[in-house]
Image: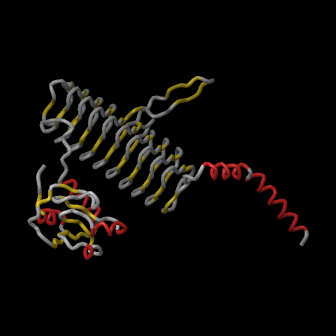
Amino acid sequence: MQNYTLSQIAELLGAELQGDGALEIKKIATLANAHSGHIAFLANSKYRSQLETTQASAVIVSQADAEYFSGSKVIVANPYVSYAKLAQFMDTTPRSASTGIHPSATVHPTAIVSDSAAIGANAVIEANAVIGDNAQIGPNSFIGKCVKIGSGTKLWPSVTIYHDVEIGSDCLFQANSVVGSDGFGYANERGQWVKIPQLGSVIIGNKVEIGASTTIDRGALDNTIIHSNVIIDNQCQIAHNVEVNSGTAIAGCTVLAGSVTIGKNCQIGGMVAINGHMSVCDGVIITGMSMVTKSITEPGIYSSGMPHTTNKEWRKSIAHLRNLSDMKSRLKALEALAKSQR
């Protein structure tokens, strides 16, 4: 691991440096667990007291918090974003595939693989696929016919990309993600399910990140579209003909049913379920475990998940819930009686 001086870090972050610029920084750590040679950061003022006790050699702080730390520091507008940028700079994550094409990989003669791309062990690249410059295809991954993968895109092991899918540049796919599998399309003929071939594809923009074991289905007729700068967490289900617009983040285990449209710069919490053919406008935040059963047309924060409580309180609440219809009828009767006696 390469070490950096505090001066180099300040220059990288475009930050104001106060203290010893020659300090050698080996690692990023939390305020609570940092030691000598580490740099920590304060992104939330409720942890400000830790500035007094941290063993970090330096910290990243905002101007508002700078006065609470007497040691060496770099002062930035947004410590959390600066931490993210520094983490990228000091990242030691290995490549998903070494340079070149591994001898055990299978590459169809009609596939076009950039000389700077890397294809891992036992990967399969099918006919007419195009792999861009500096792309990395991890071991055991499958790239279907006529797939296009842009420059700098990285696939970790066992990623499956079905036929005709198009992926932009600088994307990241975690292990076991699946893109372009059939959407859940069937017709019912007298109790027998008749499969509807899924004839669309999946189009993914630039700088998209897809979490481990997440599935993105291909469209039935039109395409499923994931626009640029979208991040999707692990174990999510994106159904056929969904469109997710740029800047949106989707947390783990969320399900978007068929033909859902998500606007720009939305944040969707974990385990959210959105019914089919719903639309969510730009700038919406949906908190975890919510169920969306009608379209959202105004920006804001939406919730429906029930917070936890004790089992005793939960059972009591459910008992009241089951009696709501009867209580409503009784209330209406009382209102009618009161009105008749006026």
Residue 71: give x, y in percent of width and height.
19, 71
Q: Position of residue 279 (x, y in %)?
A: 50, 52
Classify the position of the C terminus by image quarter. Answer: bottom right
Left or right placement of residue 31 versus residue 331 in this view = left
| Front-most of residues 53 and 169 | 53
Residue 103: x and y in percent read 15, 25
At 45% from the left and 45% from the top, the residue drawn is 254
Report the label total: 0
Is 252 displayed left or right of 206 in the figure?
A: right
In the rendered image, residue 249, in percent from the top left (x then y), is placed at 38, 52
The image shows residue 106, relative to residue 100, as above or below, that is above
180, 29: nearer the viewer:
29
Q: Tell me the residue at 46%/59% (across/down).
A: 284
Residue at the extreme right: 341
**In the image, residue 105 above or below residue 4:** above
Q: Residue at x 18, y 24 (%)?
A: 104
**Residue 305 to residue 146: above or below:** below
